[in-house]
Image (tube, grey):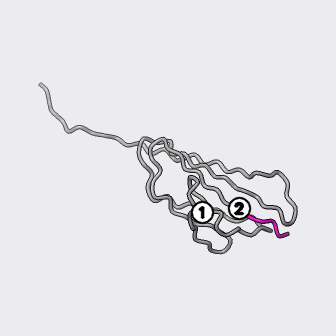
Amino acid sequence: MVIDSNTVETIVRIPPTIYKEVDKCEACVGDILTYTITIRNNSLCPLKNIVFNDRIPYGTDYILNTFEVDDVPQVPSIDDYTLYYTIPTIEPMGTVVIRFQVQVRE
């Protein structure tokens, strides 16, 4: 006896990989630091409306107009020394690169 059944598709969501780096190991007052955050979607499904947030390090100030997503200038929200930006989509196996700068004040 053969019983027909509905086709089933299982989607496995794998969390993205996030790498953060800064261009200097040491800094003095007045130095500018460039942060690069790389977010890779390791799944076969697009990631949509990903909320990126990153706290500005103590003793630094965010430099306006330095926030970029994939080399395109963007405007993040800033609240209590934290940057917020919603990434609309990261394609399957795709990567998004975020860069911004801060200046050391203390």
Residue 77 picture location, percent across and down: 58, 71
Corner quadrant of residue 31: bottom right
Helix, strand or loop at disc 1? strand
Please report the residue visible at 50 percent of the width from the left and 45 percent of the height from the top: 41
Please report the residue visible at 82 percent of the width from the left and 51 percent of the height from the top: 25
Label 1, label 2: how many angstroms apart (C-alpha)? Answer: 15 Å
Please report the residue visible at 23 percent of the width from the left and 37 percent of the height from the top: 7
Q: Which residue is mark 2?
A: 101
Q: Which residue is mark 1?
A: 53
- Indicate left or right for 38 with 26 as reference: left
Residue 9 picture location, percent across and down: 30, 40
Please report the residue visible at 45 percent of the width from the left and 51 percent of the height from the top: 47
Give the overall secondary structure of the magenta segment. strand
Name the residue furthest left: 1
Q: Toward the viewer: 85 or 67?
A: 67
Is 105 covered by the magenta stretch?
A: yes
Kind of residue at disc 1: Asn
The stretch in magenta equals 101-106
Is 33 covered by the magenta stretch?
A: no
The mark found on residue 39 in the picture is: none
Check the image and report above or below for 105 versus 22. Answer: below
Check the image and report above or below for 5 versus 98. Answer: above
Corner quadrant of residue 68: bottom right
Classify mark 1: residues with Cα within 10 Å, few (<14), some (14-19) or many (20+): some
Name the residue furthest bottom: 80
